[in-house]
Image (spheres, grey):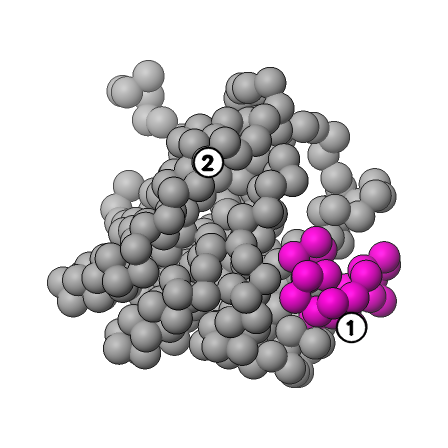
């Protein structure tokens, strides 16, 4: 497989390999991109939950971003877990220097097991300074509720919340509907000009660890290859659904998905 593009990932590490930097690298690589990283935190976790979060110093995160981009300029940037105000400010300063326009922000706030991963002050900084720098923000319903201070119960609420996020300065919002209790998942892509709803049948499984990280990274990879936003979201959602459907069924909690579902191994390697 020939490498098509370059993606810089700014996110935390997941020792169990299902989410965070590890899921991001697998996703970008499986879809034909070249993955670079700036690690924001090191976590000790497994499919049942997060044990500890060790933050990386903000100035070291900034150095990782700037030093990497100075040598290999990314086509897109995907941002995941940013746990403090200081880290967000450091990332914003780095982004101001490298001037990449295609930035995908997955506002990771709560782990699958329920562990809160960011402080209240960090959420305010995210809303006031980082969201306006993004090309696309990809919150799930609980994350959108935190950012908008409203309860989301139905499709109408999702659209209203997405509009609030646009008012924070995001150019596009993909609000994911996977947390709604229904047979179908409705993900909403919204900007100032149009609304697109992606409707897919919900797959019954506990193995959904890292789906948010994977979706944002897959969209960032498709964008980096020059695909338009709507197509990138459509392909990213399809990739994640296939990864959920073909999961390896590892772990005793929320297990990982199959990031390699896009790769067909040639016969001579089998």
Q: Determine which quarter of the picture holds residue 68.
A: bottom left
Indicate whether 112 appears above or below 140: above
Task: Compare marks 2 and 1 and give the one earlier in the sequence.
Answer: 2
Q: Is residue 150 magenta?
A: yes
Using a 10 Å C-alpha cutoff, classify the residue at mark 1 as few (fewer than 14 neighbours), some (14 to 19) or many (20 or more).
Answer: some
* Magenta residue span: 141-162
Q: Is residue 143 magenta?
A: yes
Residue designated by label 1 = 160
Residue designated by label 2 = 52
Majority secondary structure of the magenta segment? helix
Disc nearest the viewer among 2 and 1: 2
List x then y, in percent, for residue 12. 40, 47
Disc 2 and disc 1: Cα gap in Å? 35 Å
Q: Determine which quarter of the picture holds residue 187.
A: bottom right
Label 2 secondary element: strand
Q: Please report the residue visible at 42 percent of the width from the left and 38 percent of the height from the top.
A: 43
List x then y, in percent, for residue 127. 56, 73
């Amino acid at each position: 497989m020939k490498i098509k593009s370059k993606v810089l990932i700014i996110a935390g590490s997941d020792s169990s390999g299902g989410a965070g930097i590890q899921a991001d690298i697998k996703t970008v690589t499986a879809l034909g991109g070249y993955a670079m990283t700036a690690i924001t935190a090191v976590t000790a976790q497994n499919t049942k939950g997060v044990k500890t979060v060790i933050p990386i110093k903000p100035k070291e995160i900034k150095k990782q971003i700037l030093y990497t981009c100075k040598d290999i300029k990314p086509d897109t940037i995907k941002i995941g877990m940013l746990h403090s105000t200081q880290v967000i400010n450091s990332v914003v300063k780095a982004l101001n220097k490298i001037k990449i326009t295609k930035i995908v922000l997955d506002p990771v706030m709560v782990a699958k097991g329920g562990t809160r991963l960011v402080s209240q002050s960090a959420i305010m900084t995210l809303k006031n300074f980082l969201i306006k720098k993004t090309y696309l923000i990809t919150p799930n319903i609980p994350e959108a509720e935190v950012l908008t201070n409203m309860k989301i119960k139905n499709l109408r609420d999702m659209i209203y919340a997405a509009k609030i996020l646009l008012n924070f300065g995001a150019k596009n919002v993909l609000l994911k509907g996977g947390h709604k209790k229904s047979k179908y998942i409705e993900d909403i892509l919204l900007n100032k000009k149009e609304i697109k709803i992606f409707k897919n049948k919900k797959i019954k499984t506990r193995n959904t660890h890292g789906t948010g990280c994977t979706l944002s990274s897959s969209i960032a990879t498709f964008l980096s290859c020059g695909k338009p936003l709507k197509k990138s979201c459509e392909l990213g959602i399809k990739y994640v659904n296939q990864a959920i459907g073909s999961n390896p069924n590892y772990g005793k909690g929320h297990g990982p998905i199959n990031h390699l579902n896009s790769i067909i191994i040639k016969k001579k390697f089998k």
